[in-house]
């Protein structure tokens, strides 16, 4: 979720990892964060667990989704693919079946250099993530916006659909 960035941090006793503002802010306004945190709003509307299960709620508009990185990641990814408008932040596990479909349905993929440091629920900065991350754009306008972001280190891959 946007507040669950990677699996349980046993050392710190938390599953809450907030997406850094340096990622979300340059991307512009979002209509929905289906994996929101009450202290870290990044969209006009956000669903917060357990009051609202963002996976089951209606999705609309331009979406930013940083889902739980466990066994449900594929369900969240499928839902984002179906929305077709926004961004999905995941580990760059290019060898997985879940990831392979992005090469044909995403408009662009930004592979971050190094590992992102997510924030804890209290806003403090956590340790680097256990794996590299990728921001997957859905919709041409969202992919094009990645070209305008400055200060990020990594590589943008624009996808081409073969008909």
Image (tube, helix red, strand yellow):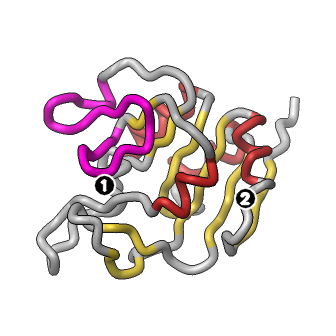
> Which secondary structure is most common in the magenta stretch?
loop
Q: Quadrant of the C terminus?
A: top right
Q: Which mark is residue 66?
A: none
**Residue 66 appears in the rendering:** yes
Report the disc number at residue 4.
1
Q: Secondary structure at mark 2?
A: loop
Looking at the image, is mark 2 or mark 1 earlier in the sequence?
A: 1
List x then y, in percent, for residue 117: 42, 74
- Which residue position is annotated with label 2? 149
Task: Reply above or below: 11 against 14.
Answer: below
For disc 1, the neighbor class at 10 Å (few under 14, some 14 to 19, many from 20) is many
Which residues make up the magenta segment?
A: 35-56
**Residue at position x 65%, y 37% in the image:** 138
Residue 74: horizontal and vertical position, in percent? 42, 43
Rate crowding at label 2 as few (under 14), some (14 to 19) or many (20 or more) other CA atoms within 10 Å.
few
What residue appears at the point 21 percent right and 28 percent down from the top-left corner?
Answer: 52
Q: How many marks?
A: 2
Q: Quadrant of residue 84?
A: top right
Where residue 10 sits in the image (x, y, percent)?
15, 74
Instruction: Identify the residue at image location x=61%, y=30%.
Output: 85
Tags 2 and 1 touching, CB below 8 Å: no
User: In the shown orientation, is residue 49 left or right of residue 78?
Assistant: left
Q: Is residue 93 visible?
A: no
Q: Does residue 49 show up magenta in the picture?
A: yes
Is 2 a magenta residue?
no
Where residue 25 appears, x then y in whole percent?
A: 55, 53
Q: Is residue 114 above or below residue 35?
A: below
Mark closer to the observer (2, 1): 2
Residue drawn where x is 62% and y is 69% of the image: 112
């Amino acid at each position: 979720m946007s507040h669950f960035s990677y699996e349980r941090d046993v050392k710190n006793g938390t599953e809450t990892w907030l997406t850094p503002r340096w990622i979300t802010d340059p991307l512009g306004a979002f209509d929905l964060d289906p994996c929101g945190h009450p202290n870290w709003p990044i969209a006009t509307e956000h669903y917060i667990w357990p009051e609202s299960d963002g996976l089951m709620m209606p999705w609309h508009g331009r979406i930013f989704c940083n889902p739980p990185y466990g066994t449900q990641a594929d369900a969240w990814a499928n839902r984002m693919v179906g929305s077709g408008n926004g961004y999905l932040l995941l580990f760059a596990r290019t060898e997985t079946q879940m990831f392979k479909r992005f090469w044909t349905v995403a408009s662009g993929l930004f592979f971050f250099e190094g590992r992102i440091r997510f924030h804890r629920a209290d806003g403090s900065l956590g340790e680097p993530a256990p794996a590299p991350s990728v921001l997957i754009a859905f919709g041409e306008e969202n992919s094009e916006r990645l070209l305008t972001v400055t200060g990020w280190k990594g590589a943008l891959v624009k996808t081409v659909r073969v008909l």
